[in-house]
Image: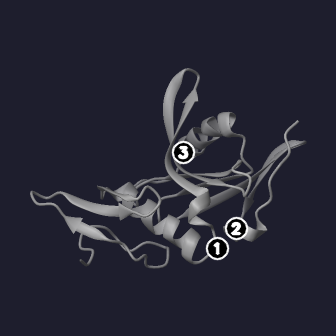
Amino acid sequence: MTNKIYPELNLPPAPLRIQSCGEGVVKVFDFLRKKYVALTPEEWVRQHFTSHLVNTLGYPAGLMANEVPLTLNGTQRRCDTVVYDRNATPLMIIEYKAPSVIITQETFNQIARYNLVLKVRYLIVSNGLNHYCCEINYDPPGYKFIENIPLYDNLTTINIK
């Protein structure tokens, strides 16, 4: 099934399995969750982005998860994607927005709040057209934007004391 719904993204084409379920319902197979999910604009970005991480940048699919629950200030939230290191320690949080959504400071605030819980080394925000990657330093505290998303083998973990 070819895409006639969503725009071309600033990501390599992804081998998506899309099915029409009738009455305007379209689903895509999420290879990380191993099930079909509603194909929304945000999901369009997520599926292309995770495919890029696995197929281009060497991220092991078995060390990635979509829709990861966490509790923040007593409220249940979900991280769009979490990447883990080989010891199953969270390493990266990725937040997706629809291609029509402009990435703002509030988007970064959202992912930074999730990081209060997970304390990862890398934060990525993408609307499929623009991608922003930050590397977090905890001692001394700070962050820096990285021009390109690193290969999985170039990611480093942090030791928080």
- Earlier in the chain: of badge 2 and badge 1, it is 1
For disc 2, the marked residue is 152
- Mark 1 against mark 3, which lies toward the viewer? 1
For disc 1, the marked residue is 58
- Seen from the viewer's position, the closer of residues 131 and 69 is 69
Q: Is residue 111 above or below residue 122?
A: above
Residue 93 located left or right of residue 66: right
- Taking the spot 68% from the left edge, 34% from the top edge, the residue there is 116
Counting from the top left corner in percent of width and height, residue 69 is at 51, 38
**Amino acid bearing label 2:** Tyr
Question: Mark 2 and mark 1: span between their CA atoms?
Answer: 6 Å
Residue 120 located left or right of residue 94: right
Counting from the top left corner in percent of width and height, residue 61 is at 56, 64
Question: Mark 3 and mark 2: span between their CA atoms?
Answer: 24 Å
Question: Does the rendering let one see residue 147?
Answer: no
Counting from the top left corner in percent of width and height, residue 82 is at 59, 51
Residue 127 located left or right of residue 35: right
Q: Quarter of the image for the C terminus: give it.
A: top right
Numbered circle sitting on residue 141: none
For disc 3, the marked residue is 107
Question: Picture quarter containing residue 115?
Answer: top right
- Taking the spot 61% from the left edge, 66% from the top edge, the residue there is 60
Question: Does the rendering let one see residue 156?
Answer: yes
Q: Secondary structure at mark 2?
A: helix
**Amino acid bearing label 3:** Thr
**Amino acid bearing label 1:** Gly
- Taking the spot 72% from the left edge, 40% from the top edge, the residue there is 119
Disc 2 and disc 1 in contact, CB within 8 angstroms: yes
- Mark 3 against mark 2, which lies toward the viewer? 2
